[in-house]
């Protein structure tokens, strides 16, 4: 009787209930604080995630240079220099293309509208060329006015540019440190873990380097092949800025998941359409033929050991990554999921599948 009374307070409540309520309140408050801290630091977290991804992607190249006798800092600097030169070349080739095509589109807009009016008239659609041309002139005037307004907002544009440059420099700084000091960083992480946990962390890290690095370098090789072939074909077709268009198609098609092929081929197609339908047909034919060559000849040989993701998994992971982190998340989704798949598969034991019509593979060829 005395024990029961001691276990209860004056209101007859068990003594463990206040402790439970205090723990629940503490957990809720802690989660609330963590949520707002993560929300406030979302930008920094994304920068760190991008930096970690880039450092893992650069690790195989830096390790290769280190085995050749290079210091890790010097090897990392060489890799960074190559990336900066490549990015600068790409941007330098694309800017004149964009300026020239926008100017060409504005100059030819009245002619395009007149042709559209004549084409629509064949189907009984009443488009008055003069009215459309006048409307086009008004639109052109609005665009020029809008351009002047943007040019006048030098402070806003400069602030945005400065913020972008700062973020890029921050990503570069973190990436350089994580890559050049990779062994030290891993030792620092492992020093606070017991031995069996250290082995697991290092195994995950090794899988991530293998999958992400192989993905990055094979995609770069495929982009180089695509750019070289595209440059030759576009030059033969007679497209202006053939090298810039080939680089655009190569980079976008290889590094943008799922829809990269369509986005990469869209710009050369539009440029060709502005010139002549024949060139546009030639571009479409080249894109289709090259895509078949890449899918069935080049990619299986180059990516056989990098990733074996089902197309549905690739599509879903790209959407999930884009939802969480925007464009960077979509770009990092495939190697991340491949790393998780490779890690989890080591703990999964697979068994022989029983024979059943529901599990039967379709025949490879039709038999008569």
Image (cartoon, helix red, strand yellow):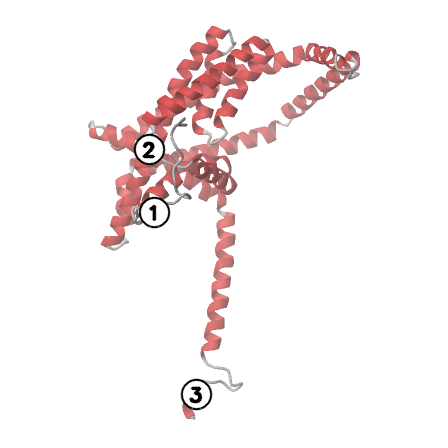
Taking depth in this image into account, of 131 and 107 the one nearest to the observer is 131
* Placement of 9 over or under 231, stated as above or below: below
The percent coordinates of residue 349 (x first, y second) are: 30, 49
Taking depth in this image into account, of 188 and 108 the one nearest to the observer is 108
Q: Residue at x 43, y 26 (%)?
A: 254
The percent coordinates of residue 176 (x first, y second) are: 35, 34
Please tell me whether mark 2 or mark 3 is closer to you in this view: 2
What residue does disc 2 label? 306
Residue 90 appearing in the image? no
Between discs 2 and 3, the one toward the N terminus = 3
What residue does disc 1 label? 354
Label 2–label 3 contact, CB within 8 A: no
Residue 300 appearing in the image? yes
Q: Which mark is residue 6?
A: 3
Q: Which mark is residue 291?
A: none
Q: Which quadrant would the N terminus be assigned to in this image?
A: bottom left
Q: CA distance from mark 1 to mark 2?
A: 30 Å
In the displayed structure image, the side of residue 33 where residue 224 appears, left or right: left
The local secondary structure at tag 1 comes to loop
Q: CA distance from mark 1 to mark 3?
A: 62 Å
Please tell me whether mark 1 or mark 3 is closer to you in this view: 1
Between discs 1 and 2, the one toward the N terminus = 2
The percent coordinates of residue 184 (x first, y second) are: 26, 42
Please tell me whether mark 1 or mark 2 is closer to you in this view: 1
Q: Residue at x 33, y 46 (%)?
A: 353
Between discs 1 and 3, the one toward the N terminus = 3
The local secondary structure at tag 2 comes to loop
Q: Residue at x 56, y 32 (%)?
A: 159
């Amino acid at each position: 009787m005395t024990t029961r009374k001691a276990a209860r307070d004056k209101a007859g409540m068990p003594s463990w209930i206040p402790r439970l309520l205090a723990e629940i309140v503490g957990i809720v408050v802690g989660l609330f604080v963590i949520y707002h801290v993560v929300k406030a630091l979302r930008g920094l977290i994304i920068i760190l995630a991008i930096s970690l991804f880039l450092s893992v992607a650069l690790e195989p190249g830096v390790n290769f240079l280190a085995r050749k006798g290079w210091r890790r800092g010097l090897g990392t600097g060489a890799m960074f220099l190559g990336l900066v030169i490549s990015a600068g070349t790409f941007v330098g080739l694309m800017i004149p293309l964009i300026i020239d095509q926008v100017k060409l589109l504005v100059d030819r807009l009245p002619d395009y509208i007149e042709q559209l009016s004549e084409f629509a008239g064949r189907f009984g659609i009443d488009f008055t060329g003069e009215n459309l041309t006048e409307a086009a002139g008004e639109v052109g005037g609005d665009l020029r006015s809008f351009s002047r307004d943007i040019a006048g907002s030098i402070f806003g544009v400069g602030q945005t540019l400065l913020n972008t440059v700062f973020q890029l420099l921050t990503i570069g700084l973190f990436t350089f440190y994580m890559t050049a000091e990779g062994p030290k960083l891993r030792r620092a992480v492992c020093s606070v873990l017991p031995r069996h946990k250290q082995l697991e962390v290092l195994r995950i890290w090794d899988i991530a380097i293998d999958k992400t690095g192989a993905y990055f370098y094979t995609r770069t090789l495929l982009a180089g092949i695509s750019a070289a072939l595209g440059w030759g074909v576009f030059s033969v077709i007679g497209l202006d800025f053939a090298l810039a268009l080939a680089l655009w198609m190569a980079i976008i098609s290889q590094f943008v998941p799922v829809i990269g092929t369509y986005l990469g081929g869209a710009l050369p197609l539009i440029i060709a359409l502005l010139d002549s339908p024949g060139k546009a047909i030639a571009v479409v034919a080249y894109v289709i033929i090259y895509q078949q060559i890449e899918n069935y000849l080049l990619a299986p040989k180059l990516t056989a050991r990098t990733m074996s993701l089902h197309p549905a998994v690739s599509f879903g992971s790209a959407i999930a990554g884009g939802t969480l982190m925007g464009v960077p998340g979509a770009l990092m989704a495939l190697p991340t999921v491949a790393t998780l798949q490779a890690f989890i598969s080591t703990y999964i034991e697979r068994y022989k599948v029983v024979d059943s019509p529901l599990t039967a593979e379709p025949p490879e060829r039709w038999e008569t």
